[in-house]
Image: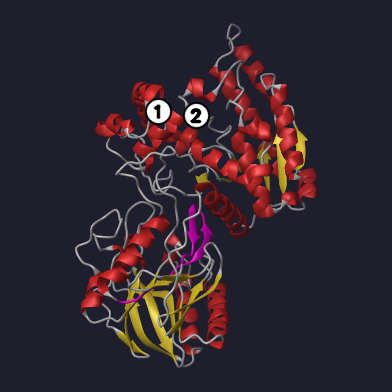
Amino acid sequence: MRIALLQLNQQLGDPVANGAAIELAYAEAVAGGAELVVTPELAVVGYLAEDRLWEAGLRALVATESGRLAKLTGSVPLVFGTFSPSPSGRLFNELWWCESGAIRQIIRKQLLPSYDVFEEHRWFEPAPEIPELIEHLGQRIGISICEDLWADQEFSSAAVHYTRDPIAELAKAGATLLLNASASPTLLGSWLPPGKAAPWTIASKEQQRKRLIQGLAKKYGVPLVYADRVGADSSLLFDGGSCLVQPDGSWQGGQRFTQGIVGVDTGTTGTSWPIFPEEGAWLRVALGLGLRENLAKQGLEAVVIGLSGGIDSSVVAAVAVEALGPERVLGVALPTAYSSGESLALAKNQAQRLGIKFLCLDADAPFAGAASALNSAFPDRIFSVTDENLQSRARAMLLMALTSEPAVHEQLGSTRIAVLNTGNKSEASTGYFTLYGDGIGAFSILGDCLKARVYSLAYELGEAITPGILHRVPTAELRPGQTDEASLAPYAVLDAILGAALEAQRPEAGLSEDLVLLLEGAELESAQKALPRILGLLRHTEFKRRQLPFNLKVSPKAFGQGRRIPLTAL
């Protein structure tokens, strides 16, 4: 059976646009010889429209568009993701099998994830029954939706254990082909130092899918077809990964992070599962997609980036240029009296290397004005962390001013401009940033990247990054002689602690032993000593992270909606 998997990029809350995209792709797939066409989960409304799903107007539009799609089908079935009301007032997450202008069968999602970024019980009701198998071209097809695939405790890495297994039930009913329509975000695994391993490491989503899909196809001796979406919405990144896997483990599928029609054939074998790309290469594609999609879907067209001459801002600028083009990026140096000449030179060089517009604004002027106001009230005050924060807030004020400045609108060819945050996850974890200073921005590209991953991405970007920046000691330059590692801990030590405690969510009581698997020698000694302080910073800076821009989720545990820590639970 030739199956077309519509690996689509959904528009959240726009059933008309999504329906039109499905219609065009269905016609193209049928013309190409498909005998069955399948969309991802909730393809009509987009995954996940969240509380827009409560809107009566949106529900009516989804119903109208779903009915229209059903009526346009011919003899080739179209299986598409939509919803319908449930008696509770919530919704059923559904797949409609439609052919010859009518709905032949409705399949409802049985397992609703409510962990990490997922909260589907808020909007959906679980299906009360297992769906019947569907006969088509000599196959008995068992159909499921996303989380229904993840119940098998032998192969699944789901955060919860379910009391029922929809795939096992479909196989027991006699399915000769399993089909799953998903909208499953992609991510890297928990971070480990190079060359190290630990039994508790969380694998990447691609590795998790491979283990699950190959394991289930082999276990039940039938092909398994998997349809997923691409694109980015808010924090979530989707890589597609649509494929068919035979019981022997052979793979057929399409290109990841690319929208299109993925054709598979149950009657043929495939190849080995594609090699998972290197971390830096994955980040380059995923973060670029996330930036481009979020700007486009939020009606933004250009960005302003504070260029410090450091690694983080240089990487953000390079990714922005790849995603948007140099004409849509403005780099801004914001020196104060504590900024070195090297920093300004590197920032200017980085802008020239990327071919972006560049400004240098004197941040000393607004900083001096604010400091003067304090000095008038406290004549005996001396330079302190207050002045460090004032410098950061002076820079933020100037960056935000540029987004509404007519001259910048003319330079960038748009009035729809956002500041990009340039902070990383290592800093955010410890509260090593200034609220309303370097914590500003419309969103954060690197907010879920530990410092080590920033460097991995920088090396992947190659010539886009000024060489002198790669080997520079990280510093905020807010006082003489300041370095990040002196204020926090060596980044290799800090990231090892955060990779275990935050991303892999290891119990605090055993973290000291966990670090033995990740570090050795002086680094291990340093980590053991720093552990209580770093964990304290992680606990006591939650109020600051609540006010950070949203980030692009690339790890198993990102700050934001997937990590809900009460401010008062210390």
Residue 274: x and y, percent?
47, 62
Disc with the residue nearer the chain's start (2 vs 1): 2
> Where's residue 1, x and y in %?
42, 85
Question: Along the line of sight, which residue is nearer the eye, 329 or 60?
Answer: 329
Q: Is residue 329 above or below residue 17?
A: above
Instruction: Determine whether 34 is above or below 303 in the image.
Output: below
Q: Which residue is mark 1?
A: 537
Is 495 situated above or below 164?
above
* Residue 342 placement (x, y as % from top left): 71, 25
**Amino acid bearing label 1:** Leu
* Part of the protein shown in magenta: 222-241
Asked which quadrant contains residue 11, the reply is: bottom right
Looking at the image, which is closer to me, 207 or 43?
207
Tag shown at residue 432: 2
Residue 129 visible in rendering: no
Tell me, for residue 419, which label it has, or none.
none
